[in-house]
């Protein structure tokens, strides 16, 4: 984020998109761009706006400045703003960038036009630095793609679309290219593509430039990984001045397992000292597994193997080198496979430069039960890891922002941090994915369109939740077209019964529900679906709650009338009075899935006196088939209370018992071990157990704790980012009463169980 000078808004930029002449514009390519310049004195500020396709790392005078760009689409191509002044010196200076386009091997989340780089100073007096033919450029032969299929047998046929890894040839690399003293006299001028064009400007290129909407990511200094296991006796480990030093004799093929101690995401670093002709393979995994793919207690290494994507580094042996991949990796474990040639290999520390959202994590939940504290910690870590330049649904396998996942993730993130920037960014991204048929895409930004109609319904609820939680209605004029299109798309698909049928495309509801969805495919004719109809009811209800705040009211009354009619039709069509359950399909009394019971109860078409029992039977006792998994469980737990809510936390306690350091995608042997759609214990523990929930569309926090089996709970949480907005809460059971002490920050009030609204600090008993 950052201010942009008025001269750069609504007109072409002086800066040009540049590349290297002869580079395949649409294929895999990596290039370096350099610009020398002299300064008599260092300015107080020198802001520049930078972007690339697909990505860049920026250096000034050899110092790392940042990487990007933030994910976007061609009509909303993000650029970053950096102040270069702190990196400059009087006299000679250098701006340098490594820029890549992974072509067909790029991550699914990376929309692309062609290889390119642009840098535009904000101040006109520094336009001489603008990217163009004054820059020097060189294509690199040191990087090659290691491609993986989306269901690759090397990865156990699991769905992987996070992009290629790389093979790096040290002997072909221009080491020191970031430094001012590097000799680039033989390099050609950069090849000019076209002028930069912000949104609203006619351009012969497809990139419409716009500032990123989320803060620059925080990048740490490298921290060393510890040795988890050495296979055999061929690796010698000694202590050097900067950490471990590893030595391997010539002619060996050895493996070394390294442990980050917890799941991490960032740039791995590997410092080589010597080893001409050797090859080092770095394989990454969230967990180890046996030959059948089963995972066990996560700290156990014996008789288990690492299966995962890998980078390959071929050494030149010409001195100390640091290897770091172009893109971040996510892992707990790294396996180094070292194949030495005629010279011994020696390398120093293997580390990780962690990457994440730059907020101060101030929220704490502490109670008198260590297991509950552990559940909160692991859930909070999952949210922290999955917050990058956008929300990410899982770090290792896909690294994309999905609507349904984000609907849950964003709520918990806002409870944890008080930050709304990622929340709003996601809503704008999804609105930008709208297609002419009236649906939004199920994941965005994404290079391959995917539609999951149930996720489009979640988008309506997501917008309602964002406005209710943040009070920010400024997003509504921007996204109402998408909201209206989605609502009309579904209302037009109601059948003669007045309900929805199963929907086309991917049509995700919950992982186990894929079995029932395939059974629907065998039905010819009426495919009326309880789950889909109830998801529509919830979306129409959310739209109605947004109604007073929408700039255009043309659909509000229609939606209200249709909501009443669909609720009546849904109960009439799917309620089985003999079983006291809801059928997935009106003609199949044997189809009573857990998802149908949860959907009917959350949509309030189930009789009020049986809703709680439906939640228990579906989400805790797993009575029904298909059973409810972690995704659908969220909607049930939102409406649970008392002993039932506490009983619903079983899967997370099992994750702790298995040594997991982030939340899983599914309950049993998950593919993804950092999946924020299951990190909602953060939200449940603060809003349900501590009972601290913002009253929708207000700056009032309701205080209504439900300690259950706990005796003490203490919460500190920011209402918006920053220490000045902290709400503090303590609850302690004393005999038959619970003593509460709560203090709201300035500008906020507390709603007490007796109906009073108070500001500042208060004490009371329940």
Image (tube, rainbow, N blue to C red):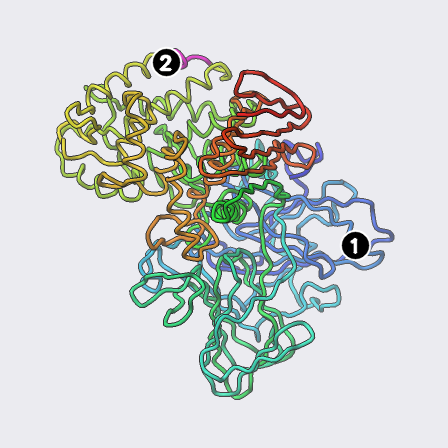
Q: Position of residue 78 (x, y in %)?
A: 57, 42
Instruction: Determine the residue positioned at 70% across, 48% down.
Output: 130
Q: Which mark is on residue 438?
A: none
Name, please, the residue furthest toward the right. 40
From the viewer's side, name the closer residue of 349 and 250.
349
Residue 133 in the image: above or below residue 583: below
Q: Position of residue 206 (x, y in %)?
A: 51, 41
Q: Position of residue 219 (x, y in %)?
A: 63, 53
State which tag comes first along the sequence, 2 or 1. Answer: 1
Q: Quadrant of residue 306?
A: bottom left
Helix or strand or loop: what does disc 1 sit on?
loop
Does 554 appear in magenta?
yes
Helix or strand or loop: what does disc 2 sit on?
helix
Q: Which residue is mark 1?
A: 88
Position of residue 101 in the picture relative to residue 318 (left or right): left
Position of residue 160 in the picture relative to residue 472 (left or right): left
Q: Quadrant of residue 210?
A: top right
Q: Which residues are magenta?
A: 553-558
Could you give the CA–CA distance between mark 2 and mark 1, rounded to whole angstroms? 60 Å
Residue 418 in the image: above or below residue 661: above
Q: Position of residue 404 (x, y in %)?
A: 40, 37
Q: Which residue is mark 2?
A: 560
């Amino acid at each position: 984020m950052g201010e942009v000078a008025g001269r750069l808004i609504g007109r072409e930029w002086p800066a040009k998109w540049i590349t290297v002449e002869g580079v395949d514009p649409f294929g895999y390519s990596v290039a370096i761009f350099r610009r020398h310049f002299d300064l008599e004195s260092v300015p107080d500020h020198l802001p520049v706006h930078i972007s690339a396709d697909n990505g860049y790392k920026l250096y000034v005078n050899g110092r790392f400045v940042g990487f990007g760009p933030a994910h976007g689409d061609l009509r909303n191509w993000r650029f970053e703003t950096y102040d270069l002044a702190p990196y400059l010196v009087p006299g000679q200076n250098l701006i340098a960038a490594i820029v890549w386009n992974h072509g067909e091997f790029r991550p699914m989340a990376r929309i692309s036009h062609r290889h390119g780089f642009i840098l535009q100073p904000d101040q006109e007096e520094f336009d001489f630095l603008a990217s163009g033919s004054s820059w020097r450029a060189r294509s690199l032969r040191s990087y090659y793609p290691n491609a993986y299929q989306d269901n690759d047998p090397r990865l156990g046929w699991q769905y992987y679309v996070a992009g290629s890894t790389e093979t790096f040839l040290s002997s072909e690399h221009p080491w020191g290219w970031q430094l001012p003293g590097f000799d680039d006299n033989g390099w050609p001028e950069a090849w000019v593509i076209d002028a930069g064009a912000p949104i609203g400007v006619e351009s012969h290129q497809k990139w419409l430039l716009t500032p990123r909407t989320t803060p620059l990511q925080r990048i740490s200094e490298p921290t060393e990984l510890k040795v988890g296991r050495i296979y055999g006796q061929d690796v010698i480990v000694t202590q050097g001045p900067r950490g471990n030093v590893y030595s391997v004799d010539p002619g060996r093929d050895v493996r070394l397992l390294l442990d980050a101690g917890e799941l991490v995401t960032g740039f791995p670093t590997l410092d080589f000292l010597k080893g001409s002709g050797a090859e080092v393979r770095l394989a990454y995994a969230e967990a180890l597994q046996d030959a059948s793919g089963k995972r066990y207690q996560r700290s156990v290494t014996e008789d288990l193997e690492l299966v995962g994507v890998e980078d390959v580094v071929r050494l030149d042996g010409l001195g100390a080198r640091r290897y770091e991949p172009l893109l971040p990796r996510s892992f707990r474990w790294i396996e180094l496979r070292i194949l030495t040639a005629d010279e011994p290999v020696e390398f120093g520390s293997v580390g990780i430069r962690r990457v994440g959202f730059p907020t101060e994590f101030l929220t704490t939940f502490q109670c008198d039960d260590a297991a509950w504290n552990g559940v909160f910690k692991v859930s909070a870590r999952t949210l922290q890891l999955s917050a990058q330049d956008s929300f990410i649904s899982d770090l290792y396998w896909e690294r994309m922002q999905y609507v349904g996942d984000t609907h849950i993730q964003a709520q918990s993130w806002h409870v944890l941090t008080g930050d709304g920037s990622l929340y709003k960014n996601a809503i704008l991204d999804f609105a930008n994915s709208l297609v002419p048929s009236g649906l939004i895409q199920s994941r965005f930004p994404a290079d391959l369109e995917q539609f999951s109609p149930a996720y489009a319904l979640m988008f309506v609820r997501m917008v309602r939740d964002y406005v209710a939680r943040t009070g920010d209605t400024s997003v509504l004029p921007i996204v109402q077209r998408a909201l209206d299109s989605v609502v009309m798309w579904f209302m037009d698909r109601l059948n003669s019964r007045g309900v929805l049928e199963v929907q086309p495309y991917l049509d995700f509801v919950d992982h186990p529900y894929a079995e029932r969805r395939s059974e629907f495919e065998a039905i010819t004719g009426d495919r009326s679906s309880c789950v889909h109809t109830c998801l529509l009811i919830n979306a129409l209800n959310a739209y109605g709650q947004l109604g007073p705040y929408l700039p255009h009211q043309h659909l509000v009354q229609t939606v209200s009338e249709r909501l009443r009619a669909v609720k009546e039709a849904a109960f009439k069509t799917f309620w089985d009075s003999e079983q006291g359950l809801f059928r997935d399909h009106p003609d199949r009394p044997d189809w009573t899935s857990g998802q149908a019971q949860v959907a009917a109860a959350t949509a309030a078409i189930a009789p009020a006196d049986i809703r709680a029992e439906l939640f228990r039977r579906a989400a805790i006792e797993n009575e029904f088939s298909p059973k409810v998994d972690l995704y659908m469980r969220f909607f049930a737990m939102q409406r649970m209370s008392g002993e039932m809510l506490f009983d619903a936390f079983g899967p997370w306690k099992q994750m702790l018992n298995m040594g997991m350091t982030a939340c899983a995608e599914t309950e049993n042997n998950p593919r993804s071990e950092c999946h924020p759609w299951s990190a909602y214990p953060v939200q449940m523990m603060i809003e349900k157990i501590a009972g601290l929930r913002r009253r929708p569309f207000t700056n009032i926090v309701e205080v209504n704790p439900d300690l259950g089996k706990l005796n003490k709970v203490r919460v500190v949480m920011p209402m918006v980012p920053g220490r000045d907005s902290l709400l503090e809460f303590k609850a302690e059971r004393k005999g038959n009463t619970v003593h509460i002490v709560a203090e709201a920050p300035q500008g906020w009030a507390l709603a007490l169980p007796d109906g009073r609204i108070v500001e500042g600090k208060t004490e009371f008993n329940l």
